[in-house]
């Protein structure tokens, strides 16, 4: 039970972080250790077709950031300011020479990485909204590596709290004047089909 509670606490703490201590670097070894976690994930057909491009130099981070889109529900917020942008990224790519469809390997592996990052005190944000062709270009990705997700990483510089959902349609996260980010989550009873 202790391990269950530890896992639950880690999941509760594993929020999508969008403002970071940009000047606090995340090194190549840490990114490598995070990718190592993905080797233990389940994989459809055990094909293991996902690859990761680490991004951690300030120059590459600067090239990747403008290609990403942040927090669609915060319509008056253009994304993190200079100084609070990600210190690193992992770009998850599908090796299309192996398959055109990775089933749910992508999500499983992203979750393993974000949990591992959280355990190290590092915040993460899974980003699906990004400019694929431009990203492949700036990172000189070989054509057979198709970027699926950008995982932004950095030490958190924002407070995030979970909220009970007051209505089933109330899915939009929001930020209050005190700069706290609030994330509504459905109640357990809503998830269980009776
Ligand atoms: C598949 C997926 C795609 C996402 N894409 C983006 C994105 O493009 N930009 C962004 O700011 N957040 C993105 N997110 C983060 C979600 O907005 C976030 O998970 C959601 O608001 C709930 O917050 P939480 O992760 O703290 O529980 C994505 C999350 C997932 C799982």
Image (cartoon, rainbow, N blue to C red):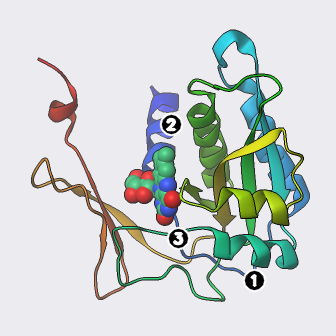
Mark 1, secondary structure of its residue: loop
Residue drawn at 16 percent across, 20 percent down: 193
Mark 3, secondary structure of its residue: loop
* Left/right of residue 67 with respect to residue 145 in the rendered view: left
- The reply to whether the residue tagged 3 has its Cβ within 8 angstroms of ligand 1 is yes
- The reply to whether the residue tagged 1 has its Cβ within 8 angstroms of ligand 1 is no
Q: How far apart are marks 3 and 2 (CA)?
A: 23 Å
- Is residue 148 visible to the viewer in this orientation of the structure? yes
Task: Tell which of 158 and 92 is nearer to you.
Answer: 92
Task: Tell which of 67 and 188 is nearer to you.
Answer: 67
User: Where's the N terminus, which quadrant?
Assistant: top left
Residue 7 - label: 2
When the figure is inspected, residue 126 is found, relative to residue 176, above or below; the finding is: above
Foreground tag (3 vs 2): 3
Task: Tell which of 87 and 98 is nearer to you.
Answer: 98
Residue drawn at 50 percent across, 39 percent down: 6
Q: Position of residue 121 (x, y in %)?
A: 64, 60
Residue drawn at 58 percent across, 87 percent down: 81
Task: Give the residue number, with chain letter if any, for mark 3.
Answer: 18
Q: How far apart are marks 3 and 1 (CA)?
A: 15 Å
Task: Give the residue number, with chain letter if any, for mark 1.
Answer: 23
Q: Position of residue 74 (x, y in %)?
A: 35, 75
* Left/right of residue 28 with respect to residue 74 in the rendered view: right
């Amino acid at each position: 039970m202790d391990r269950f509670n530890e896992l639950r606490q880690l999941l509760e703490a594993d929020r999508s972080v969008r403002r970071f201590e940009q000047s606090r670097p995340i090194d190549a070894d840490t990114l490598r250790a995070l990718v190592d976690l993905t080797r233990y994930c389940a994989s459809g057909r055990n094909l293991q077709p996902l690859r990761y491009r680490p991004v951690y130099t300030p120059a590459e981070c600067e090239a990747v950031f403008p290609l990403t889109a942040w927090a669609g529900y915060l319509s008056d917020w253009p994304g993190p300011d200079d100084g609070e942008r990600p210190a690193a990224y992992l770009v998850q790519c599908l090796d299309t020479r192996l398959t055109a469809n990775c089933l749910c390997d992508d999500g499983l592996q992203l979750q393993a990485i974000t949990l591992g990052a959280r355990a190290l005190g590092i915040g993460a944000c899974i980003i699906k909204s990004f400019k694929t062709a431009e990203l492949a270009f700036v990172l000189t990705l070989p054509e057979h590596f198709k970027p699926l997700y950008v995982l932004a990483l950095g030490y958190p510089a924002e407070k995030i709290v979970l909220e009970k959902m007051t209505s089933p349609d109330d899915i939009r996260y929001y930020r209050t004047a005190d700069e706290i980010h609030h994330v509504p989550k459905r109640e357990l009873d809503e998830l269980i089909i009776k």
